Structures are given as C-alpha cells and as structure tokens.
Image (cartoon, grey):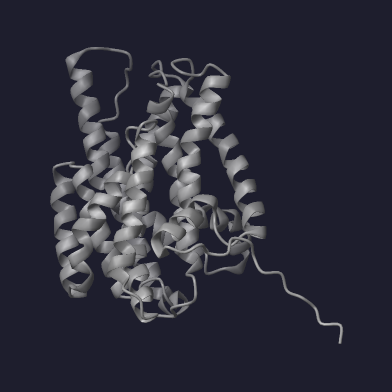
C-alpha cells in the first residue's frame, strides 16, 4: 500500500453514499407527511424504501471499516502508533456526534465511534476470519432485520476489503468486478421483486393489516439492503474505470473528500431551510426531494471551491488536528515560478 497516496475511488464512494443518506434523513428531520394513496408522493415513498433506505448508509458504514484499516496501516508504516491515533480520532468523532445527535437523533457518528472501539482488535485478525465472520454475522442480522447490529459486520467487511487490497489496482481486476456486480445485480432484482410484493398501497390508514404489511415491507428492505449496496458499489467502480465518468462524477469526489463536513452540514442546511420556510410538518415527499437537490448543488459547489484552495474540509481539518495533536497546514501550497 502506498502510504502517501489517497485512494480517490473511496472519495467517490463516500460522496455517492452521502447523496442517498440525506434523502432518507430529511424525512424525520422535517416530519414529512405520509403520502396519500395513488399519488406521485406514494410512488416516491416506495422508491425511497426500495432503492435508497438502508442502501447508502450501508455503503457509508462499510467505507468506515475500509478507512479504519487504511488509517492504522499508514500510520504504522510512518512509524507512528496507529492505535493511539485512531483512539484520539474516534474520541473526537464521538464528541462531534454528541453535538450532532441533539439535532439529528438518528445520526451515525456516535454509533461509528462506539463500534470503532469494538472492531479495534480485528485489525490484526486474519483477513479470512474478518471476511467469514463479518459475512456470517451480516447474514444473521439481515435475516432478523437488526439494522443497528449490522454496523459491526459491515465494518468488519470493510476491514477485510482493506486487507485484501480490494480498492487498489482495480484496472487489473475488471473481470472480477464485472462478475461480482453481475451476481449482485441478479440477487438485487430477486430481492426487490420479493420486497415489492409487500409494498403498502394505502397510507394514512390505521388498519392493522396495513401496518403489518408495511412492517414486513420495511424489514425485507433492511435484509436485502447490503446486496443492493454491493451492486451500487460494483457499478460505480466499473463506471469510474472510464476517464469520462471520472470527470462527469468529479463533484462526488470533492463531496466525499469532505464527507464529515458535508454529513453534518446536511443537517444544518435542512434545519435552516425548515425554519426559514416553515417546512416542519408542512412538506411533502416530493418537496423534500427538491430541497435535497438544492442542498446537493450548494454542497457540491462549496466542496469544489473549498478544496481548490484548502487541503482539508473545515471539520476534517479540526478532526486531523485533534488526532495528531498538531495544527496541520490548511491552505494548499502555491507553486512558485523561479525567474532566475
């Protein structure tokens, strides 16, 4: 592993995960009203819980595991104590999460920090052990639809991916990626067909049968979430093998490189819009989509411009400062041209 080179693909994937996370998070934050039956709102609700809910959070969690492995490995390679640095890192993450959770009760940072402590011993575990144990645990938790308890196995799979160097030299693994993505696509189609059979047709109805049907619909969605997430990741990896898609999707790279800043500022922008436009309990599902699109534009522009002048996002800089107990240079170094 090149200890000094950033893996751009991981930034693309983090950015991709963030664009899905906000679509779901905005619903409880603004208390979006349940849609009426047979409307575009009801269609979008089904779309969210078929293709978004539990899919992007899964990717984000998996990437935390990948980042965990890379961070400690590179720190150790530079002669530093990776464990100590990582402990400082998750303490800082936990503190930021404690602030964030006051505004967003379903936030992930505190959960990630706690789970980061739990998975710490697995850094030195054999990669086969992490892969097998993570996969088995994920299957069990998926069967019982224990969404919260899927975090640790997803992180373990992320560690295993780091140990197997999955995201390095991908151009040499194209055929394997195509095979993996094809298998995940087939399983995703089967899972979505099964889930859709339980899609509720009536909303705002307190009938017991509708409630049970909705719960089953949501539970199946949690169970098949990692499969669909794996397909999304495989597809994006394949697309990014092309320089054309690297340029087209370049905003995702900046967006993902400032993942911590953008994740927390999503909540801030949602609350800002909610208060300024009186949106709490007064917004529909489609309107929430329009608001998310607006936030994308704002954050994409901000991330791109910010990283043109600075090395790290604002919160990433603070996070790095606490981790290393030193003040890292924020501004990018400008190249000087000699006039000799």
Compared to residue 288, the image places residue 90 above or below, namely below
- Total count of labels: 0
Compared to residue 104, the image places residue 110 above or below, namely below
Q: Residue at x 23, y 19 (%)?
A: 210
Compared to residue 250, the image places residue 40 above or below, namely above
Residue 22 pos. (x, y %) = 45, 38
Q: Residue at x 29, y 29 (%)?
A: 199
Query: Which of the image's four quarters has the C terminus?
Result: bottom right
Compared to residue 50, the image places residue 205 above or below, namely above
| Picture quadrant where residue 83 is located | bottom left
Q: Nearer the viewer, residue 282 or 83?
A: 83
Q: Residue at x 76, y 75 (%)?
A: 336
Residue 80 pos. (x, y %) = 35, 76
Query: Which of the image's four quarters has the N terminus?
Result: bottom left
Q: Nearer the viewer, residue 339 or 37?
A: 339
Q: Is residue 291 visible?
A: yes
Residue sitting farthest toward the bottom: 340
Residue 70 pos. (x, y %) = 36, 70
Q: Is residue 236 visible?
A: no
Residue 81 pos. (x, y %) = 31, 73
Residue sitting farthest toward the front: 326
Q: Is residue 31 left or right of residue 215?
A: right
Q: Residue at x 40, y 77 (%)?
A: 173
């Amino acid at each position: 592993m090149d200890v000094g080179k950033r893996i751009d693909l991981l930034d693309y994937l983090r950015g991709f995960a963030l664009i899905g996370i906000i679509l779901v998070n905005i619903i409880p934050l603004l208390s979006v009203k349940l849609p009426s039956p047979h409307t575009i709102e009801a269609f979008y609700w089904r779309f969210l819980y078929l293709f978004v809910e539990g899919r992007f959070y899964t990717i984000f969690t998996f990437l935390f595991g990948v980042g965990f492995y890379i961070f400690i490995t590179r720190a150790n390679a530079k002669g530093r104590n990776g464990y100590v640095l990582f402990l400082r890192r998750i303490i800082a993450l936990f503190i930021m999460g404690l602030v964030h959770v006051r505004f967003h009760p379903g936030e992930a940072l505190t959960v990630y920090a706690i789970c980061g402590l739990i998975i710490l011993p697995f850094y030195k575990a054999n990669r086969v052990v992490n892969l097998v144990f993570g996969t088995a645990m994920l299957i069990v938790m998926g069967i019982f639809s224990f969404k919260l308890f899927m975090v640790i196995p997803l992180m373990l799979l992320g560690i295993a991916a780091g140990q197997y160097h999955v995201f390095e030299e991908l151009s040499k693994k194209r055929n394997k990626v195509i095979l993996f993505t094809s298998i995940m696509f087939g399983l995703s189609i089967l899972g979505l067909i099964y889930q859709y059979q339980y899609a509720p047709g009536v909303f705002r109805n307190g009938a017991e049968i509708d409630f049970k049907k909705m719960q089953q619909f949501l539970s199946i969605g949690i169970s098949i979430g990692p499969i669909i997430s794996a397909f999304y990741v495989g597809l994006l990896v394949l697309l990014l093998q092309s320089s054309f898609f690297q340029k087209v999707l370049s905003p995702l790279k900046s967006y993902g490189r400032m993942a911590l800043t953008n994740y927390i500022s999503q909540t801030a922008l949602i609350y800002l819009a909610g208060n300024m436009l009186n949106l709490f309990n007064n917004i529909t599902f489609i309107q929430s989509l329009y608001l998310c699109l607006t936030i994308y534009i704002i954050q994409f522009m901000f991330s791109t411009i910010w990283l043109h002048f600075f090395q790290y996002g604002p919160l990433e800089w603070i996070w790095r400062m606490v981790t290393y107990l030193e003040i890292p240079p924020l501004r990018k170094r400008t190249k000087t041209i000699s006039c000799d």
